[in-house]
Image (cartoon, rainbow, N blue to C red):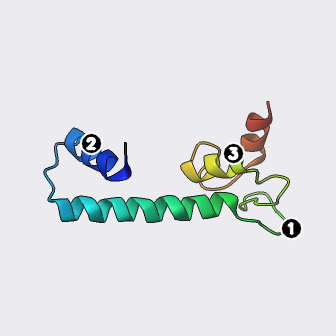
Amino acid sequence: MCQSDQIRRIAQLAHLSLPEEDLASLARDFQQISSLFEQIVNASVPEVPWKEGQLDLRPDVATKPRVARLLTGSFTDGLFVTPAAIKDDES
């Protein structure tokens, strides 16, 4: 299923009736967001000093799966990495 078909299906499931131009625009927006997310997940982050309560993106801590979970909110206490969140992940 191509991306425009996926967008069309999502619109149908949401009971939206959108013209083709809007569906095409949504597909472009989705592609841009997907591309940006991929860039963030694959970004090389330099090692920086870290304090509790700060976003911890050191390379040894910021693995791709962890960054993905961090960005989707499934690895945080709020928006920040905490020792408890890291400990839970490593268990």
Give neighbour class at mark 3: few <14, some 14-19, many 20+ (Cα, 10 Å).
few
For residue 64, the mark is none
Give the number of the disc on residue 65: 3
- In the image, farthest residue toward the front: 1
Q: Name the residue under label 2.
A: 9
Of the two numbered discs 2 and 3 in the rendering, the one whose residue sits closer to the viewer: 2
Question: Which kind of residue does numbered mark 2 sit on?
Answer: Arg
Alpha-carbon span between mark 2 and mark 3: 28 Å
Q: What residue type is labelled 1?
A: Pro
Tell me how far mark 1 sits from mark 2, CA to CA: 46 Å
Label 2 Cα crowd, 10 Å radius (few <14 / some 14-19 / many 20+):
some
Q: Is residue 85 above or below residue 31?
A: above
Give the left or right position of residue 7, taking residue 18 as reference: right
Q: Where is residue 76 in the image (x, y as percent from the top left)?
A: 64, 47
Residue 86 found in image quarter: top right
| Residue designated by label 1 | 49
Callout 3–callout 1 Cβ contact below 8 Å: no
Q: Foreground mark, 3 or 1?
A: 3
Q: Mark 3: which amino acid?
A: Pro
Residue 35 drawn at (x, y percent): 53, 62
- State the SS at label 2: helix
